[in-house]
Amino acid sequence: MPVSQAVHKAMAKGSPHRYRSAREFGATLQKALHNEPIEFFNPAVYAPAAARRRAYEKGDYDYAGEIVGELESEGHLDGK
């Protein structure tokens, strides 16, 4: 599964979602092949964004705003 995730990230439509370099892609593939943890595939990293999106889609803007505030306070988002 990690190799599949690495390849999917490399093929992402939006450039912000792809690797910044071939070196980064290669390093990620090496980690995947050796079953080493890959930070940006860690569910704890992207779970807040997924929860915010679900809350926003359901119209729960207060909850979505709380999650964004938490991410900003943890340094994951630029507050601008």
Image (spheres, rainbow, N blue to C red):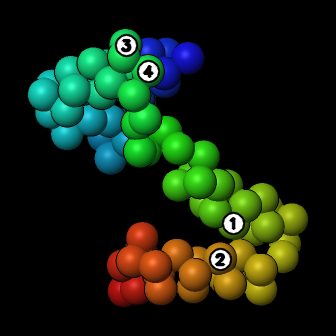
Q: Are marks 2 and 1 in contact (CB under 8 Å)?
A: yes
Asked if 57 appears above or below 77 in the picture, the reply is above
Q: Which numbered dot is residue 35?
A: 4
Asked if 77 appears above or below 12 in the picture, the reply is below
Disc 3, SS: helix
Q: In this rendered view, identify the residue nearer to me: 9 or 75.
A: 75
Work out which quarter of the rendered image holds the N terminus and state it. Answer: top right
* Label 4, label 1: how far apart the Cα atoms are: 29 Å
- Residue depicted at x 31% and y 19%: 29
Residue named by callout 2: 67
Q: Left or right of 24: which side holds 61? A: right
Looking at the image, is mark 2 or mark 1 earlier in the sequence?
Answer: 1
**Residue 5 in view:** yes
Q: Position of residue 78 (x, y in %)?
A: 36, 78
Residue named by callout 1: 52
- Residue depicted at x 36% and y 86%: 80
* Label 2, label 1: how far apart the Cα atoms are: 6 Å
Residue named by callout 3: 33
- Label 3, residues with CA under 10 Å away: few <14, some 14-19, many ≥20: few
Q: Are marks 4 and 3 in contact (CB under 8 Å)?
A: yes
Disc 2, SS: helix
